[in-house]
């Protein structure tokens, strides 16, 4: 975020490739430095190129400006007549739409439209968007055109009460830069607010979602498609809409139910599981390490204060931009894939196209590989038992996962335990991936699984497990080790209570996520013996210093012995 302030912009250009292409003309924009590349960055690079290209910055504010840009571009690339022809075609479509609106008369369900380019906080449409709405026969009270038939002011943040007072006939959700599916997910939080559910447009089913990234947010010829779609929508004439226009009617989700209370269960050393373990993962805790490494002190402090005050976001102290807090993103219930600064989901859905994952997971959580389960935030079992597969990333784990997924009578969930740094320096925290349990020689009397036998298909870290989870659509349950070293003990000496504590937390997460009664939990692994842990003691509630209570007795040799009396069934690997 500080890159804008320093003049570097949010986006980068492959200057080497640009130089290699030797363009005569480079098209850019300075309308928004957040949504697209900053014009100053483009100009700076162009000045260093030989030969130096002509840089044309397009900054339309109205529909007419967009049409005029066709001529500007045509002239710049030596195709002036073609540019004029394109502009003339757009003018004809614009005139036809206006004439049709005059013939159709007032929209049957009212004219007031609330066009939202963002939902939390609320940002209404600006520039050409209110102009298009008025051309289609509607009005846009949240940000009306500055003059009759002209564009509106740029979008500015609104309070929820402004939308309530507007009481729109139609609500169009069109988040800037997002496709339909992502736009729907982003709106799920606001959809749970009582004031939103009481809006007349919501109750009467006149809320729609549009792919704004394609149709409204970018000032190009597709704005005429958007106008024609608006005419069809407001006048309830689907035959007038472009047949391939990307939109969908909003399906209002049911109110979320609070997770069931899980009874506390005493663990060795005086710690508890169940509800206390889960509640420790719900709010911001001082004993929990931050999920975002490498942040400056002033940003960490601004985030801490916002969380303590129960706020959903804070203002970046350097840029003034709004940033969602870790707690707000956790309440949303999923990773959106946009590499949010305080993403508590470990950047689970972040792809290489967006960037690499850098955030840590610092609380027990269930990651849904199936995006259709985001809305309910629960695991749908249909009465089937849930099999926790202890994931070690080796060949045996891969083979077992593939075999279990072929059995439709069970729901398979990958169980991963990671080491989340609690006091790791910022730069080191970025460079080190979270380590998982890995296959080590088993305790005496157990089945040996040496490190050399682990022929991994993926790295033995959390990111590798995430890749497998997403690729095979297998839910991933992550239990971080919020831990301190245990003096005088080694991984082979950790007691069975350590393993049981992890499984107990995992079971608690599952029980809070599954609404069906009579949940049956099983556990399996590629090896009958528990994997070796680092020389630490696991404290799923964030409590440190558990050395005395749990002792240093020899660990149990098999999973079956670890799970004895727990109510969780051990399923030997097939």
Image: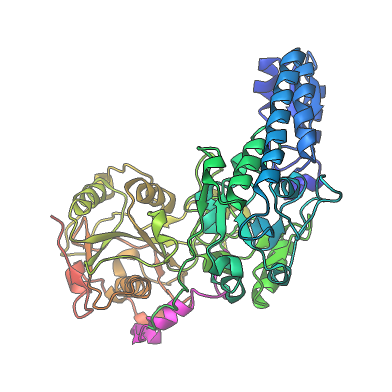
Where does the image place residue 245, in percent across and percent down from the top left? 54, 40
Relative side of 352 to 75, left or right: left
Q: Quadrant of residue 224?
A: top right
Bounds of the magenta segment: 262-290
Where does the image place residue 387, in percent across and percent down from the top left? 24, 63
Whether residue 272 is in magenta: the answer is yes
Q: In the current view of this chain or complex, which residue is farthest to the right? A: 147
Q: Quadrant of residue 311?
A: bottom right
Where does the image place residue 43, in percent across and percent down from the top left? 81, 28
Q: Residue at x 66, y 41 (%)?
A: 100
Q: Quadrant of residue 507?
A: bottom left
Whether residue 468 is in magenta: the answer is no
Q: Nearer the viewer, residue 207 or 462?
A: 207
Look at the image and tell me whether residue 452 can be seen.
Answer: yes
Relative side of 44 to 90, left or right: right
For residue 242, above or below residue 303: above
For residue 9, above or below residue 553: above
For residue 549, above or below residue 352: below
Q: Nearer the viewer, residue 480 or 65?
A: 65
For residue 406, above or below residue 535: above
Q: Nearer the viewer, residue 173 or 87?
A: 87
Where does the image place residue 442, in percent across and percent down from the top left? 23, 60
Q: In the current view of this chain or complex, which residue is farthest to the left? A: 574
Look at the image and tell me whether residue 174 can be seen.
Answer: no
Q: Nearer the viewer, residue 132 or 445?
A: 132
Relative side of 168 to 514, left or right: right
């Amino acid at each position: 975020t500080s890159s804008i302030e320093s003049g570097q912009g949010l986006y980068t250009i492959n200057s080497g490739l640009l130089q290699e292409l030797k363009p005569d003309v480079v098209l850019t924009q300075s309308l928004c430095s957040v949504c697209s590349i900053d014009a100053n960055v483009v100009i700076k690079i162009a000045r260093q190129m030989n030969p130096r290209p002509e840089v044309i910055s397009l900054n339309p504010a109205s529909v007419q400006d967009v049409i005029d840009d066709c001529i500007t571009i045509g002239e710049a690339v030596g195709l002036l007549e073609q540019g004029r022809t394109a502009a003339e075609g757009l003018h004809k479509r614009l005139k036809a739409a206006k004439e049709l609106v005059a013939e159709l008369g007032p929209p049957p369900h009212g004219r007031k439209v609330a066009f939202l380019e963002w939902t939390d906080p609320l940002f209404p449409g600006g520039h050409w968007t209110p102009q298009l709405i008025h051309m289609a026969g509607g009005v846009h009270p949240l940000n009306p055109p500055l003059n009759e038939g002209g564009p509106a002011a740029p979008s500015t943040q609104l309070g929820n009460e402004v939308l309530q007072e507007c009481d729109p006939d139609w609500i169009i959700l069109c988040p800037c830069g997002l496709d339909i599916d992502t736009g729907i997910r982003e709106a799920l939080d606001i959809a749970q607010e009582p004031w939103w559910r009481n809006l007349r447009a919501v109750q009467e089913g006149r809320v729609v979602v549009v792919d704004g990234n394609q149709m409204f947010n970018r000032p190009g010829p597709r704005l005429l498609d958007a106008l024609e779609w608006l005419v069809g929508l407001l006048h309830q004439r689907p035959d007038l809409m472009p047949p391939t226009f990307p939109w969908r009617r909003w399906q209002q989700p049911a109110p979320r139910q609070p997770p069931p209370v899980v009874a506390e269960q005493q663990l060795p050393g005086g710690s508890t599981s169940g509800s206390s373990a889960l509640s420790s993962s719900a709010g911001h805790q001082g004993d929990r390490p931050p999920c975002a490494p490498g942040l400056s002190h002033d940003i960490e402090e601004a985030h801490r204060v916002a969380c303590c005050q129960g706020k959903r976001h804070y203002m970046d102290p350097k840029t003034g931009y709004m940033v969602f807090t870790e707690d707000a993103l956790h309440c949303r219930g999923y990773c959106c894939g946009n590499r949010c600064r305080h993403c508590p989901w470990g950047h689970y859905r972040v792809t290489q196209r967006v960037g690499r994952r850098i955030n840590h997971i610092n609380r027990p959580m269930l990651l849904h590989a199936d995006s259709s389960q985001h809305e309910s935030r629960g695991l749908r079992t249909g009465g089937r038992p849930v099999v926790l597969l202890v994931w070690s990333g080796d060949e045996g784990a891969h083979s077992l996962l593939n075999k279990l997924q072929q059995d439709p009578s069970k729901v398979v969930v990958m169980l991963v335990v990671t080491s989340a740094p609690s006091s790791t320096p910022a730069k080191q925290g970025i460079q080190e991936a979270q380590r998982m349990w890995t296959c080590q020689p088993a305790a005496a009397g157990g089945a040996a699984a040496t490190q050399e036998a682990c022929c991994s298909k993926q790295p033995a870290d959390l990111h590798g497990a995430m890749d497998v989870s997403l690729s095979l659509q297998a839910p991933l349950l992550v239990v971080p080790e919020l831990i301190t070293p245990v003096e005088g003990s080694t991984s082979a000496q950790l007691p069975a209570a350590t393993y049981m504590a992890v499984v107990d937390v995992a079971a608690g997460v599952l029980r809070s996520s599954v609404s069906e009664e009579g949940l049956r939990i099983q556990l399996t692994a590629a090896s009958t013996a528990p994997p070796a842990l680092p020389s630490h003691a696991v404290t799923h509630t964030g409590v440190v210093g558990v050395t005395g209570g749990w002792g240093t007795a020899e660990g149990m040799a098999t999973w079956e012995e670890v799970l004895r009396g727990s109510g969780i069934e051990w399923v030997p690997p097939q």
